[in-house]
């Protein structure tokens, strides 16, 4: 087990005092067998009039913040401490009926998985499906674990990671044609590729631990991170990080899950003013770790 501490600071700056609308933050992980929340703190400046918590349609924890007074800046600082238990690909126990692809989901589970099996992005030329089909053996069953691991690593090895200042996530087709993207772009590509094969997949946001040493190849540090989960009978929801070629939850701190990236935005809100009033923003994320004795 490992103790992770995450400090996440987002600051918005304005050219004049502006009034703020409601802001929503998704930064607090849910407890699970592989991660246990030990502490969570939210600090806002200006002081909020109210902070209330809800669980969204996926069960993610969301803080809703109301700011009473106008200001030339808005700053959110969050801290979480989590007890994390790594799960690796070798630990996967897949049902025999799903050990090779193609496979079918249990009739009892299929209705609940239906929306995350359906593709969400139009693809008239079927580019994503053609790309995904290269990982399926011709004329013989394909080991399910190998299919998914190979797809995950292919994105990590064949696509260029490039931070982008524009908001949002590009379409899977754009990622395929440009061969570059952010962690959100790569996660969405793998989600839609899995869905094109009839495999349930969903989008995940959180943080990634990047070891502070020379030569570290882990990408996505210094900000929030995104990857995907794939539902495999017998193994359940399994983490795949195509940005780093990680299978399992090693170094990944899961905060929220969703059908689509637009439902998993770490922070969003509004202000009363025009585009010229906005002066800029900064984001800083630090993930540190210490081992436990048990």
Image (tube, rainbow, N blue to C red):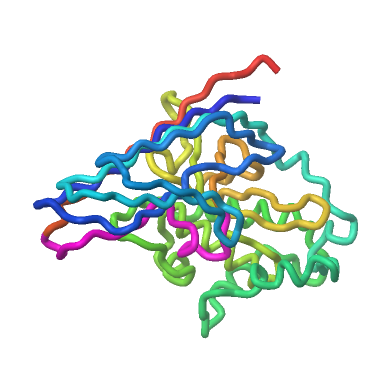
Query: Is 125 or 104 nearer to us in this picture?
Result: 104
Q: Residue at x 41, y 63 (%)?
A: 169
With 278 as the anchor, is 144 left or right in this view?
right
Q: Residue at x 65, y 54 (%)?
A: 150
Image position of 268 with respect to 225: above or below = below
> Does the image show residue 245?
yes
Q: Residue at x 76, y 52 (%)?
A: 236
Image position of 178 with respect to 209: above or below = below
Query: Is 43 or 256 nearer to us in this picture?
Result: 43
The reply to whether the magenta stretch includes residue 270 is: yes
The reply to whether the magenta stretch includes residue 278 is: no
Query: Is 24 or 222 nearer to us in this picture?
Result: 24
Q: Which residues are magenta?
A: 257-276
Image position of 179 with respect to 11: above or below = below
> Does the image show residue 154?
no
Q: Residue at x 43, y 45 (%)?
A: 224
Q: Image quarter for residue 182?
A: bottom left
């Amino acid at each position: 087990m490992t103790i992770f501490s995450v400090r996440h600071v987002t600051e918005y700056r304005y050219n004049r005092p502006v009034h703020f609308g409601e802001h929503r933050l998704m930064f607090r992980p849910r407890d699970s067998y592989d991660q246990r929340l030990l502490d969570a703190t939210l600090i806002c400046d200006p002081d909020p009039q109210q902070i209330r918590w809800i669980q969204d349609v996926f069960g993610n924890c969301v803080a809703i913040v109301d700011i009473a007074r106008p200001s030339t800046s808005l700053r959110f600082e969050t801290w979480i401490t989590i007890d994390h238990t790594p799960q690796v690909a070798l630990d996967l126990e897949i049902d025999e009926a799903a050990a090779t692809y193609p496979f079918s989901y249990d009739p009892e589970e299929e209705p609940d998985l239906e929306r995350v099996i359906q593709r969400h992005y139009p693809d008239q030329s079927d580019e994503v499906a053609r790309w995904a089909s290269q990982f399926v053996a011709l004329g013989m069953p394909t080991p399910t674990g190998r299919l998914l691991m190979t797809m995950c690593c292919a994105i990590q090895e064949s696509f260029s990671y490039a931070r982008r200042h524009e908001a949002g996530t590009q379409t899977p087709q754009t990622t395929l044609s440009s061969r570059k993207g952010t962690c959100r772009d790569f996660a969405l590509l793998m989600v839609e590729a899995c869905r094109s094969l009839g495999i349930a997949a969903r989008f995940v946001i959180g943080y990634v631990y990047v070891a502070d040493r020379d030569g570290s190849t882990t990408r996505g540090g210094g900000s929030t991170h995104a990857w995907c989960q794939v539902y495999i009978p017998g193994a359940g929801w399994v983490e795949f990080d195509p940005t780093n070629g990680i299978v399992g939850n090693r170094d990944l701190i899961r905060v929220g899950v969703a059908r689509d990236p637009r439902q998993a935005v770490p922070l969003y809100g509004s202000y009363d003013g025009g585009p010229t009033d906005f002066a800029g923003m900064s984001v800083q994320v630090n993930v540190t770790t210490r081992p436990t004795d048990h």
